[in-house]
Image: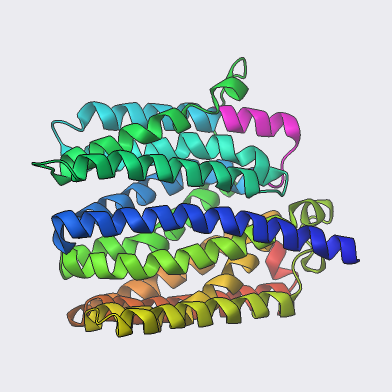
Amino acid sequence: MIAFRSRHVAGTVGSAAWMVSGRGFGFVWRLVVIGHLGIGDFGLFAIAIAAAALVMTPLEAYYVVRVARIDDASFAVDRASRWWLGLAVMVVGLAMFHWWFVPGLILAKAGADIAFNAYRSTSIRAGDPSWSYAVEAARQLVALAAGSIVLFTAGATLERASLAYLLALVPFALLAAGSSRGVRPRLPHRERRTGSMIVEALGAAAYTQGDIVLLGILASSAQAGYFSLGSLVVWTVALVAQNFSITFHEELRSTQGHVSSGPRLRHTLGLAAASGLATLLTGVVVLVADAPRGLWLTFMILSLVAFTRVISSVFTTVLAVQAADHLRMRITVTAVLVKAVVLVALTSQGAVGAAIAFVLGDLVMVAWAYRALYRSPGAARA
């Protein structure tokens, strides 16, 4: 039992260290953009990156969900299909970048991420995401360096810096070329379950990034920029929890997702409490640094989301292995609607209103998933 626990802890800590490093480089990039171009231009970049996630998530949803539960031969086909898809989207985005900056940035970033995720999927399937996050950290560092070099030169613009940032991602998008060679890609199966996967992914994308885009449209790019900084911390915390649950992939797969094979609830709650406290302390640091009220208050409110995100990330992983795709779709769509309605109602509050909407949406998601896993086991496999 000690070795069993140690393996999961080691895998979580190792992947979290690399993941936080990569996110740290991404955070530095955001600060560099703000320092050289201002919060308005950064907000525009943040909106484009959020839109890229909205494009990427449904396109690769089918492959993401299947990673932990299909056989090796099917996985190899999925990985090749995912890589070719990402490569095609990236090339289209780069081709249109010069004539249509923002849509080109959106498509190129989405495609580069899909192609790179095909490479990462091997270690994630094995329940050891540490290597994938180590390469992701290197990718973020190279992109940070390339974009920063342009920003530190005279006459720098967001368009030029973004292009340098994108071009730095291209070599990493090609890493899955070797494993995809000789493997024939295949379109997703045409069945109801596939539709549920895609709809759930659309909802998940809207849930994770749609608020930044919506806030930019309804309020301003500056408010979107403030909220983007806070949500970056929250989603980093969520990835730590996801990595924790990924280390249980083999056990969950062997029991078809039985909840007893996943993380224990008290461990999940402990990690959630630590994450919420860390985010709250970040808000205190931002306050002491005399940042704008909207920024430090956003961080403090999002500390509640840092708590709930850990729980929902673990629950979602278990439900995915259980193949509860229809249930996950219903949970996600409902949470998205709650979040969107509250955000629209609190638009005048800017980033703070978006943070409150995030809290309420996440509470809905956690409560429903908990009931499915611990109160209605039959429903979790529906």
Q: How many marks?
A: 0
Residue displayed at 84% across by 52% down: 254
The residue closer to the viewer here, 20 or 269, is 20
Q: Quadrant of residue 298?
A: bottom left
The residue positioned 24% from the left and 82% from the top of the image is 290
What segment carries the magenta color?
67-80
In the foreground, 127 or 345: 127
What is the x, y in percent for residue 20?
Answer: 51, 59
Does 109 sit above or below residue 358?
A: above
Q: Quadrant of the C terminus?
A: bottom right
Q: Main secondary structure of the magenta part?
A: helix
Q: Is residue 230 visible to us here?
A: yes
Q: Looking at the picture, how far across and down is residue 18, in whole percent? A: 56, 53
Q: Is residue 345 visible?
A: no
Q: Answer whether residue 11 is magenta in the image.
A: no
Q: Residue at x 67, y 62 (%)?
A: 244
Residue 274 vertical placement versus 4 (above, below): below
Pick out the residue farthest to the top. Answer: 182
- Answer with the quarter of the image where residue 318 lies: bottom right
Q: Between 364 and 7, which is closer to the camera in this rendering? A: 7
Question: Residue 24: which quarter of the image?
Answer: bottom left
